[in-house]
Image: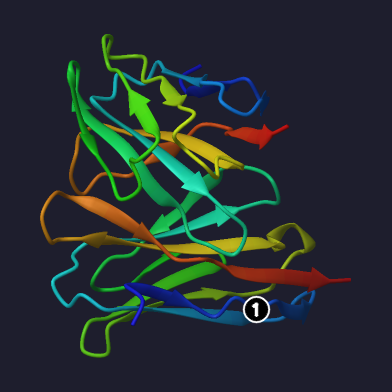
């Protein structure tokens, strides 16, 4: 089983739609979780950290489910500019502190 | 205007040649990282540095070398021992090693001639 798994997509949604992605992680001791956005041929940029109680930033909501070991990202009222690949990032608590990156979920918002 | 810069944007390597990728940050971050990204794969950690004059191997260090002589700089050398170097290389930094947000540079795309 991969340490971090994401559905690669693509998710094709119309403008204004609500879309949700999940990301599962294998190490129950992981403590830090992030969502990054990566545009084609560009560097990843932090979208939001994921806190235990869940958190919201405008149209974006992140949730953590420790029991089932997954994090989710919900995007409401999708914009064309939301089209990108969304990377799930989880810390690896075994040995030296480092992060494990998922392969990303590709989102296309259609006009 | 703080950030991370990487150069060059594109780099071509001939067989048997060593090449060096530059990474500079002015965020006053202690920790710096090098990742490699291949199509369809997540970012993989090559090397990381917690502090000046210290660095550690990541998951795929073979064929690569680094130095950390200054806080701001963390260059990566891709040696001729790296048999499949074609990839997108990303440098990142964070305030410290640990549960800290990582910020990325714009990346260098390395191609083998």
The answer to whether A60 appears left or right of A13 in the picture is: left
Residue B26 vs A12, above or below: the answer is: above
| Residue A109 position in % (x across, y down) | 77, 71
Closest to the observer: B60 or B68? B60
Snapshot colouring: rainbow
The extreme front residue here reads: B16
Number of numbered markers? 1
| Residue B86 position in % (x across, y down) | 61, 42
Report the residue marked by disc 1.
A9
**Which residue is at 59% across, 42% downward?**
B88
The answer to whether A25 appears left or right of A108 in the picture is: left
Closest to the observer: A75 or B7? B7
| Residue B69 position in % (x across, y down) | 26, 10
The extreme top residue here reads: B70
The answer to whether B105 appears left or right of B58 in the picture is: right
Q: Quadrant of residue B110?
A: top right
Secondary element under disc 1, as helix, strand or loop, is: loop
The answer to whether A108 appears left or right of B92 in the picture is: right
Residue A90 vs B30, above or below: the answer is: below
| Residue A96 position in % (x across, y down) | 14, 49
**Which residue is at 10% across, 55% downward?**
A95
Does residue B6 appear in the picture of this structure?
A: yes
The extreme bottom residue here reads: A68
Does residue A57 appear in the picture of this structure?
A: no
For mark 1, does the 10 Å Cα neighbourhood hold few (<14), some (14 to 19), or many (20 or more) residues? few
Chain ID of residue with mark 1: A
Q: Quadrant of residue A75?
A: bottom right
């Amino acid at each position: 089983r991969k340490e971090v798994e994401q559905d690669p997509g693509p998710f094709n949604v119309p403008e204004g739609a609500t879309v949700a992605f999940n990301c599962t992680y294998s190490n129950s001791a992981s403590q830090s979780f992030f969502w990054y956005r990566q545009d084609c041929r560009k560097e990843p940029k932090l979208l939001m950290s994921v806190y235990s109680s869940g958190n919201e930033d405008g149209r974006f909501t992140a949730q953590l489910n420790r029991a089932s070991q997954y994090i989710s990202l919900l995007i409401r009222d999708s914009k064309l500019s939301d089209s990108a690949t969304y990377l799930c990032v989880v810390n690896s608590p075994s040995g030296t502190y480092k992060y494990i990156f998922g392969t990303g979920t590709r989102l296309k918002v259609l006009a | 205007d703080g950030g991370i810069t990487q150069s060059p944007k594109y780099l071509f390597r001939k067989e048997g040649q060593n090449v060096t990728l530059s990474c500079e940050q002015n965020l006053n971050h202690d920790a710096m990282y090098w990742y490699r990204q291949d199509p369809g794969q997540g970012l993989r950690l090559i090397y990381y540095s917690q502090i000046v004059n210290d660095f550690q191997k990541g998951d795929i260090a073979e064929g690569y070398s680094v130095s950390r002589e200054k806080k701001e700089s963390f260059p990566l050398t891709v040696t001729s021992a790296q048999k499949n170097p074609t990839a997108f290389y990303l440098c990142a930094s964070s305030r410290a090693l640990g549960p800290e947000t990582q910020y990325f540079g714009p990346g260098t795309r390395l191609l083998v001639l």
